[in-house]
Image (spheres, rainbow, N blue to C red):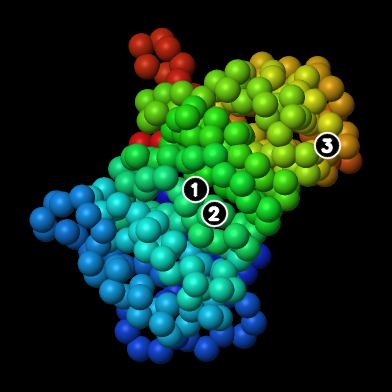
Amino acid sequence: MTFAAHARTFAGRPVVEVPTDGPLPTVAGPVSWRFARSEWDQTNEEKPSDGFRAAFEEFVDRAGPTVESLVVGAWGYAAFNPAPIAQLCAAAPRLPALRALFLGDMVTEECEVSWMKVGDVSPLLDAYPHLEVLRVRGGDDFRFSPVRHDRLRGLAVESGGLPKEFVRAVLDSDLPALTDLELWLGTPDYGGDTTTADLAPLLDGSRFPRLRRLGLRNAEAADDLAGALAAAPVVRRLDRLDLSLGTLGDSGAAALLAGQPLTHLSDLDLRHHFLSEETAATVVAALPGVRVDVSDPQEPDVYDGESYRYTAVSE
């Protein structure tokens, strides 16, 4: 599976599309505006999309002061056109109310996630000191630099393979308000070389003291992560733990249950997993006060006698 649909909600608001022409639609209450301009660059030059740039400037001129939440979809053809990070940063003075930003809301038909040219997304946090939620999606040239940001509460990074350099830079950042962290670790085939050792500053609880939700999602090494989380100090202060979209199997679930108590959690998300029916039922029964999601069970693929598990987002 890859990305099959655009976001319908973001930051607790319905997503409303910015039309290609005409006025903005009338809305009742707060919304997340979605801006996208998909076009094929015949030159194949790796430069920002002129069509996106011009249309986005017009949108900001019209609606900038009132935009509180923004979803950015296709910025031309993302395999050739790099993400409009510089343009978004330059527009910050004209987007004074922006508190939530999602960069990269594209489906597979628009661009495979591993092809999406993004660049370093951390300048967005420097440009928007009042931003509270940042979600980014990407694959090619996907980078982060350590930053200090006093307001960011939620950070989500979606990828088919998240490089360890990206993860280390996030963990080296000073984010005192962060309560929600979501990392899609992916597979080595798409650059996802992050190991549990790279996550040590997160798992030992030394980073992000206000963290209450942790998502280590879409991970090929989900069993290893479950084993590490079984004794990780950070788990004790979490309210929600998310290991969904990965390859969690019976051994990982057994290690998780054999470790520290999880009864303090309100939610444990394991959907898209490779658990047997018996193990899935055991996890649910062991945590009666916890909302445990074991939906979307998967079956391994078998080739030449070898069994293979796949993350939800891969290609």
**Residue type at tag 1:** Ser
Q: Which residue is mark 3?
A: 237
Q: Is residue 263 left or right of residue 155?
A: right
Q: Are marks 2 and 3 in contact (CB under 8 Å)?
A: no
Q: Which residue is mark 1?
A: 122
308 vs 239: above or below: above
- Pick the residue in front: 263 or 288: 263
- Pick the residue in front: 99 or 189: 99
Please tell me whether mark 2 or mark 3 is closer to you in this view.
2
The residue lying at 43 percent from left, 69 percent from top is: 91
The quarter of the image holding the N terminus is top left
Instruction: Name the spot of residue 217 as percent of width and height, x first.
Output: 58, 36
Specify whether residue 137 is in view: yes
- Circle 3 residues within 10 Å: few <14, some 14–19, many ≥20: some
Q: CA distance from mark 1 to mark 3?
A: 27 Å
Q: CA distance from mark 1 to mark 2?
A: 5 Å
288 vs 227: above or below: below
Q: Could you say which disc has been placed on residue 6 in the image?
A: none
Task: Say which label, 1 or 3, has the lower sequence index.
Answer: 1
Q: Which residue is mark 2?
A: 125
The residue lying at 78 percent from left, 44 percent from top is: 210
Q: Are marks 1 and 2 in contact (CB under 8 Å)?
A: yes
**Residue type at tag 3:** Arg
- Circle 1 residues within 10 Å: few <14, some 14–19, many ≥20: some
Please tell me whether mark 1 or mark 3 is closer to you in this view.
1
> Farthest residue in the left direction?
43
Task: Say which label, 2 or 3, has the lower sequence index.
Answer: 2
